[in-house]
Image (spheres, helix red, strand yellow):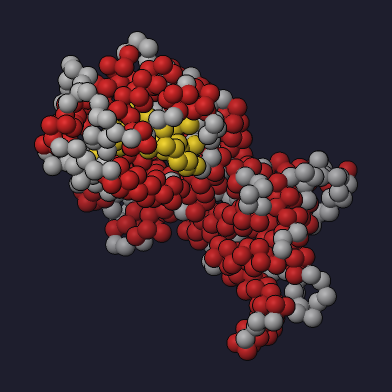
Amino acid sequence: MEMAVNSVSPSEFDSSTPPESSEKNLQPFFILHKASSRSSHRRRIHLSPSKSVIKTDDLLLRMEAFQSVWSEIHSASKDVLRDINTSAFNDIYHWVRQSFHAITSYGMPGFGQATRSFPLLTHATSKQLFTGLVLTKNMEFVDDLLTFEELGLCLKSHGCHVANLSSTDFSAKNGIGGCLRSLLRQFLMVSLDAADMSILASWYREQGNYNSPLIVIVDDMERCCPSILSVFILTLSEWVVKIPIILIMGVATTLDAPRNILPSNVLQQLCPCKFVLGSPAERMDAVLEAALLRQCSMFCIGHKVAVFLRNYFLNQDGTVTSFIRALKIACAQHFYMEPLSFMAGALFEEDNQGFQGERNVLLEGMLKYASELSSPDSDTRAEQIDTTLTCRLRELKRLQKCWSSIVLCLYEAGKHKIRLLDIFCEALDPEAYNSVASDNHTGLGKGFGISTPSDPSMRQQCFTMRKGGFICQAIQKVRLLPEASLSQLLKSWENLTVDIYEIHDKVKELQSMVKLEEGRISKEDLTDICILCSNDRRHASWRRLNIESSKRINEKAASLIDCMVRDFLRPIECLPFHEIGCFRNVEKLQLVYTSPGAW
């Protein structure tokens, strides 16, 4: 497939539908395709790829890189959103089983009685409808849909019969018949004109479905027409003694909402149980951690882009779905616009499968091309460092991994008080880092309120002490942690810094000191302390944390996280070759994201 680079627009590079027309279409796809044979494509640029051939295939390489990188980000996002609900979903399933057992313990009527339309004469408590109220904590409607779809799939996987009803099914226009027909259609898998619950009872008894409960899920009860929802609940309660129906309803604001919506005679028919899902902020932080920090896809966003997405999430949209879609738009724009971006795919694949055979040859050609396209800052640094381009790119990847690890260490320190998204945005800010250098002649850094030394490591220390900053708050929180919480924090730091040996050794040393102070240190741990304390430290900024020190361990831990920030939290936009994976064009993202017609 021969094609000039400038023959494709961003809409063809990533042809997903605009935000307003699709909330769930997040799968990456293209109009252009890779060559039918990967081996034939590689042979076209084998051994000594010329500049003209590389440039001809530049867009194809970037498309392939986008596909690999976005697939990893999207997969990580889906997995973490599924995992974050796992505990609540498991609790709901156990409650469903208990409710089903309680319903069937009253004794199920015979086929003739169960399929007749008139009610049975039973005790009032047996007619109560087991109802799960799931608090979504103001989760937006789009996220509600996805969450309750996942819940439905989870319950189906356990053998339950499930019907997912939308709040739009409970409109005054459709009436009670509309929502009953929707319910029957989902259970029976056929369209019916009649809104007759006896049809459902017959299906349940005749088809051998009677060993499993019938679950009806309403995604957001507060969006339903109250009168239609009330009649629906009363109808289900009449039939619950004939067929084991269990109701689950989403509640966006407060678990007291049913009292404000439903009349008292309807509330009396409910036997409620309350469940709580993660808040939108918790879900957002989980997606951010999984998509951009935990796994190194080599794609990241610049400070202004991160701030735009944060503000849009908080002030305008509020959906995790839209945040993921915005990441996809940013990713597609980056790989379309940035010539060096194809290297992100190469570095990403290196982690996953390595480079062997022809892939090594292709990489060398890509590196030569990248050296011609690199930015002035990167060229300057390349002249100063006597290493190959490959080493410099791998150093970029290492520094980006270190940066991510330190951001997560800060998040662990400030957990339950400070949001990851806030720490993330502040850690990306290049102005907070560069303004210190540009204002050296004044003796003050902008907004820092402290003296501005000329030494680079001390400049970064100023960065950590920004007044009112989230990073500063996280460090301060370490000083106030009780002993048990500090021990847990150090354990999380140990896991996060396993690939950063300079920090990892210090964390292990602090952990041993905590054990020693608690009186539960072993001889092996004491030996480890001696070894750690005797090791030479390569970085001049590290201060020895001696066991004989009279300082409290909290202060040592705070000093350690301060050292982490000082040495490894250099904003990504300040790193050489950051252009490879860092999308910074916030104006383009604003145009595309807020004006779908621009594509």
Identify whether 531 is placed above or below 306. Answer: below
* Depth order, front residue of 550/119: 119
Q: Residue at x 70, y 50 (%)?
A: 471
Above or below for 484 versus 264: below
Is any atom of residue 372 visible in this view? no
Name the spot of residue 572 as percent of width and height, x first: 60, 48
> What x and y, as percent, mark residue 150?
35, 40
The extreme bottom residue here reads 523
Point 88% across, 47% down: residue = 443
Which residue occupies 11% across, 36% down? 206
266 vs 467, left or right, is left
Q: Position of residue 411 (x, y in %)?
A: 62, 52
**Which residue is painted at 19% across and 42% down in the image?**
210
Query: Dividing the image into 4 quarters, which one contains the N terminus?
Result: top left
Can you say whether 352 is above or below 187 in the image? below
Which residue is nearer to you in this view: 88 or 422? 88
- In front of the other: 329 or 422: 422
Q: Is residue 38 in view?
A: yes
Q: Residue 449: name its quadrant.
A: top right
